[in-house]
């Protein structure tokens, strides 16, 4: 059976894509403008930490897409070939995310300690001591210092941009010449990329979020961020496939079993997130070391405890129980619904990790409901609009699917299934 050749995109569909890209760009610029305004009319540090949440959220999704590409090549997966191209387009956002991270670096150099207190060794901490005289900081100062923070952050984006560029170049080139060498090249890139991506995402989470409360110790933090990267990428993947199917692009291409495989993998990471999060909590609770327990103690008072409960049920119980059913994994409507819930809860999870760094005069975290969450929303919309614009710009430059990939026929005929109902995705023929 030969693979179907995707016909050229109609002019009206290309125009619709360009129009949608412009709308996302305008929404992104508007969101960023509102966030910038917040620095003037609101609590500047609260706005800055909200921006950290927004950057971390979209970096997590982009890194998750990069990891899905890497896993696809390492496992020589067949079913994911038809959706891999969408993740390749998604990773085009890394360049813009690097640009959007620059304000945080500029702030770190111009006003050390404004966002990350450990950057100012004269910053007064609990008990009247300063960061520079704190034994815990002194032991970590070789890692927690401004030049290292800057160099590592630049390296993170360099790794992500470089890897995504290599994967995209090889994949797009194969559309033209069909040479299997591009597949082998991507496989070699993935072998090195899995190590670099795993290390970079872990250190990025530690530098950008965990170090906001640098006294805290956790060996699970990088793995927690990895779980959210994967879950976020697959949630957005379901949103993209839903859009492409209902726009008509994926009709006759995307079938039930391809969707089921994607959502089943997302379901596996529901359990993985629960395992990682429970392990972190249990080990810290069991050891009962003050340098570790304080992080949870301040989140188990006031309305932060209800945020924690929301994470427990929204991150685990709800998607777990919903996706136990085969039909909800293999039908676009329910899969989209649960994926959107997961995407929102990941954002709340990042807020739970970052925003308690905002303290009152008694050095206690400000109540969640007292925070101006408008700045979180504007940051997420602003950065997300730029990422969506970047995706749509890339979308128009390549074929819908990698038409000459060696596994494309296997992917298109994956179990020869019929497609879910809006539901349904028609079977490939």
Image (tube, rainbow, N blue to C red):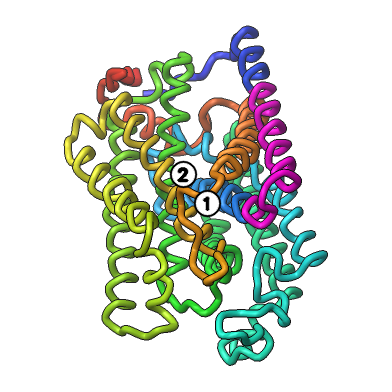
- What is the secondary structure assignment of the residue under circle 1? helix
Q: Position of residue 109 (x, y in %)?
A: 80, 67
Q: Are marks 2 and 1 in contact (CB under 8 Å)?
A: yes
Q: Is residue 164 above or below residue 261?
A: below
Q: How many marks?
A: 2
- What is the secondary structure assignment of the residue under circle 2? helix
Residue at 41 percent across and 79 percent down: it is: 292
Q: Which mark is residue 279?
A: none
Q: Position of residue 250 (x, y in %)?
A: 44, 20
Q: Which mark is residue 60?
A: 1
* Magenta stretch secondary structure, dominant: helix
Q: Position of residue 412 (x, y in %)?
A: 38, 28
Q: Position of residue 7 (x, y in %)?
A: 54, 14
Taking the magenta stretch, the answer to whether it contains residue 183 is no
Residue denoted by label 2: 233
Residue at 65 percent across and 68 percent down: it is: 116
**Of residues 392 and 120, which is closer to you in this image?**
120
Q: Quarter of the image for the N terminus: give it.
A: top left
Residue 49, visible in the rendered structure: yes
Could you tell whether 311 is left or right of 362 in the image? left
Chain part drawn in magenta: 21-48
Could you tell whether 411 is left or right of 45 in the image? left
Q: Splitting the image into 4 quarters, where does residue 427 fall?
A: top left
Q: Is residue 401 above or below residue 429?
A: below
Give the alpha-carbon distance from disc 2 to disc 1, as whole Å: 8 Å
* Of pointers 2 and 1, the one earlier in the residue sequence: 1
Task: Count neighbours of disc 1 (C-alpha within 10 A) and say few if under 14, some if 14 to 19, many if 20 or more.
Answer: many
Q: Quarter of the image for the C terminus: give it.
A: top left
Residue at 44 percent across and 30 percent down: it is: 239
């Amino acid at each position: 059976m030969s693979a179907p050749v995707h016909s050229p995109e109609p002019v009206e569909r290309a125009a619709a894509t360009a129009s949608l890209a412009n709308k996302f760009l305008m929404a992104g610029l508007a969101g960023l403008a509102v966030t910038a305004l917040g620095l003037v009319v609101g609590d500047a540090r609260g706005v800055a930490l909200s921006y950290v949440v927004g950057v971390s959220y979209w970096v997590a999704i982009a890194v998750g897409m990069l990891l899905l590409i890497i896993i696809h090549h390492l496992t020589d997966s067949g079913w994911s070939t038809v959706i891999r191209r969408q993740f390749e387009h998604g990773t085009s956002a890394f360049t813009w995310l690097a640009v959007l991270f620059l304000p945080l670096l500029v702030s770190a150099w111009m006003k050390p300690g404004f966002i990350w207190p450990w950057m100012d060794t004269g910053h007064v901490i609990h008990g009247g001591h300063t960061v520079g005289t704190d034994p815990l900081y002194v032991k970590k100062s070789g890692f927690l210092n401004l030049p290292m923070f800057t160099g590592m952050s630049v390296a993170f984006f360099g790794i992500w941009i470089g890897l995504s560029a290599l994967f995209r170049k090889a994949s797009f080139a194969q559309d033209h010449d069909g040479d299997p060498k591009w597949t082998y090249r991507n496989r070699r890139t993935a072998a090195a990329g899995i190590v670099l991506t795993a290390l970079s995402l872990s250190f990025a989470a530690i530098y950008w979020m965990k170090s906001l409360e640098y006294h805290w110790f956790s060996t699970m933090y990088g793995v927690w961020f990895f779980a959210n990267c994967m879950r976020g990428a697959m949630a957005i993947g379901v949103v993209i496939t839903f859009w492409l199917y209902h726009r008509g692009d994926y009709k006759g291409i995307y079938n039930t079993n391809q969707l089921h495989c994607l959502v089943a993998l997302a379901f596996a990471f529901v359990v993985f997130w629960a395992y990682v999060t429970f392990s972190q909590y249990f080990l810290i609770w069991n050891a009962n070391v003050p340098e570790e327990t304080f992080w949870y103690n301040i989140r188990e008072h006031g309305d932060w405890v209800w945020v924690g409960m929301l994470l427990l049920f929204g991150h685990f119980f709800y998607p777990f129980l919903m996706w136990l059913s085969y039909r909800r994994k293999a039908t676009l409507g329910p899969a989209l619904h649960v994926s959107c819930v997961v995407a929102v809860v990941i954002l709340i999870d990042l807020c739970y990790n970052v925003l308690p760094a905002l303290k009152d005069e008694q050095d206690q975290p400000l109540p969640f409901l007292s925070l101006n969450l408008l700045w979180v929303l504007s940051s997420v919309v602003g950065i997300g609009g730029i990422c969506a614009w970047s995706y749509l710009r890339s979308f128009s430059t390549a074929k819908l699917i990698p038409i000459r990939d060696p596994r494309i026929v296997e992917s298109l005929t994956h179990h020869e299934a019929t497609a879910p109902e809006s539901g349904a995705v028609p079977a490939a023929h």
